[in-house]
Amino acid sequence: MNKKGFTLVELLAVIAVMAVLVITIAPNIIESFKNTKKQNFISETREVCRSATNTYLRESIMSYEKKLYNNIETNPENTLELQGRKEYKYAVYVNTDGEVIGILTYDGTNAIFIVNPNGIEPNTIDENDFYSVNAKTMNIEQAKNLLQVGR
């Protein structure tokens, strides 16, 4: 007899093996995706920190004063030229020495908040500073309250 197909038992066995593979692999893929997103957010925060310092140093030729850079307000005066995502929000205080002393960054679900009166080095920003939040309602007044070190 000439068979030209698979039996129902063979098809069910293949489907069962594929289901087991998907169940064991899917959590690893999801976790890898979350870690990649977290690392990208940390990298963007480091870039905000570097950009704030560089912008301050360029602008400080005229005067030395503490400065808040942010894109949280509706019409912010002091924004940074960044290449990252547009929904990414930040508030960064820079002291008169050009050091970042307070930084708050968020994208609606993730945030990094650091205050250090001695200065924040971009390379020191890591996973310990990262946390998940519901920051969709964050505004400039809340950011200023969190970053009181700049006053």
Image (tube, rainbow, N blue to C red):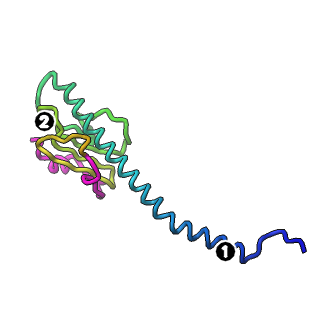
Classify residue 54 by image quadrant: top left
The magenta stretch spans residue 133 = yes
- Tag 2 secondary structure: loop
Write down the quadrant of residue 50 in the picture.
top left
Mark 2 or mark 1, which is nearer the start of the sequence? 1
Look at mark 1 in the image and give the residue it sits on. Answer: 13
Cα–Cα span, label 1 and label 2: 66 Å
* Residue situated in front as seen by the camera: 4 or 37: 4
48 and 73: which one is in front? 48
In screen coordinates, is 21 left or right of 31?
Answer: right
List the single residue furthest toward the left.
151
Q: Quadrant of the N terminus?
A: bottom right
Residue 148, image x, y percentages: 12, 46
Disc 2 packing (10 Å; few <14; some 14–19; many ≥20): many
Where residue 143 sits: x, y (%)?
Answer: 20, 48
- Image spot of residue 59 (x, y percent): 20, 25
In this view, the mark in front (1 or 2) = 1
Above or below, comparing residue 134 to residue 69 in the picture: below
Give me the disc on residue 95: 2
Up the image or down, 112 lies above or below 66; here it is: below
Q: Quadrant of residue 49?
A: top left
Q: Residue at x 42, y 59 (%)?
A: 31
Residue projecting furthest to the bottom:
9
x and y percentages locating residue 104 in the rendered image: 23, 47
Counting labels gives: 2
Looking at the rendering, the stretch of residues picked out in magenta corresponds to 125-151
At 33% from the left and 49% from the top, the residue drawn is 107
Return the residue nearer the eye: 74 or 115. Answer: 115
Instruction: Give the residue type at disc 2.
Output: Asn
